[in-house]
Image: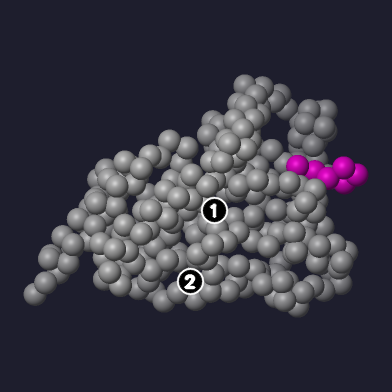
Amino acid sequence: MTLLPVDREGLVEPTALAAAFTEDTVLVSVMAANNETGALQPVAELAAMAHEHGALFHCDAAQAVGKIPLDVQSLGVDLLTVVGHKMYAPKGAAALYVREGMALEPVVYGGGQERGLRAGTENVALAVALGTAAWIAAAELADGAPARITALRDDLHQRLAVALPGRVRLNGPEKNRLPNTLNISVEGVLGHELLAAVGQIAASTGSACHSGTHTPSPVLTAMGLDSARALGALRLSLGRWTTPGDIETAAAALTRAVLASDIHVQP
């Protein structure tokens, strides 16, 4: 297995993929969108390159499906993963797109369920829920949901930047990312401490906690961010029911928590 590096924005560079191919390369797997920064990978370009070298291409689109338009034909992928709970279906349902003509070895032998790839009784309720969630998401995409969410996300970013001048740093690309994702670091504040001080906001940090010790996110570290900035990261995600009022509330609460932290650390 060869792991590909990413640039400062968390994107796989096509030149890095080109340099990684060997005569033994059979599969390239790249996520459509990063789950922490929302960075959108150049999937179509990478898939075309994989095919030029005789390899198959799999795309993990769990984070992207339902948030941006996706077309397996335009992307040119051979395999694509969809996860239900990322687009408001119940947890436990997922789907794998398999390009016509591809032959896969079954995960579980013995039965003809799921086109012979996984024996065992299907959970029909979850399958229907996944399909319904996809139908609703497609309708919302056609109705302009990405633009609405993008405007709210950028409003949140702007409010924080104005309230905390010179201290709010965006992690990941400014443009080429999911409409609902805002990953920022606030200088002088640790992400997990900030999140703990804001009880009315459900968000996540850019660090992992092991036995009380916080370590920087591998995603942000791979992007070349220093430890202080990675530990200060906060991922703010918007959703279907986010309102302008929610944005105002979140910005005000985060600002109060940061300013209160500043007072606390004064000698």
Residue 170's image quarter?
bottom left
Count all numbered tags in the image, as a single digit: 2
Vertical comparison of 150 with 169: above or below: above
Place of residue 97 in the rendered image (x, y in percent of width and height, measured from the top left): 75, 42
Residue holding disc 2: 221
At 75% from the left and 78% from the top, the residue drawn is 19
Is 212 colored magenta in this rendering?
no
- What residue range appears in magenta? 97-103
* Circle 2: element type: helix
Q: Quadrant of the N terminus?
A: bottom right
Whole-angstrom CA distance, mark 1 to mark 2, is 20 Å
At 83% from the left and 28% from the top, the residue drawn is 112
Relative horizontal placement of residue 144, taking residue 215 as reference (left or right): right
Residue 192's image quarter?
bottom left
- Decide: few, some or many residues near mark 2? Use Cα within 10 Å; few <14, some 14-19, many ≥20: some
Which mark is on residue 178? Answer: 1
At 77% from the left and 60% from the top, the residue drawn is 47
Task: Tell me the amino acid under the disc marked 1.
Answer: Leu
Dominant secondary structure of the residues highlighted in magenta in the image: loop
Residue closest to the far right: 101
Relative horizontal placement of residue 75, taking residue 65 as reference (left or right): right
Vertical comparison of 128 with 49: above or below: above
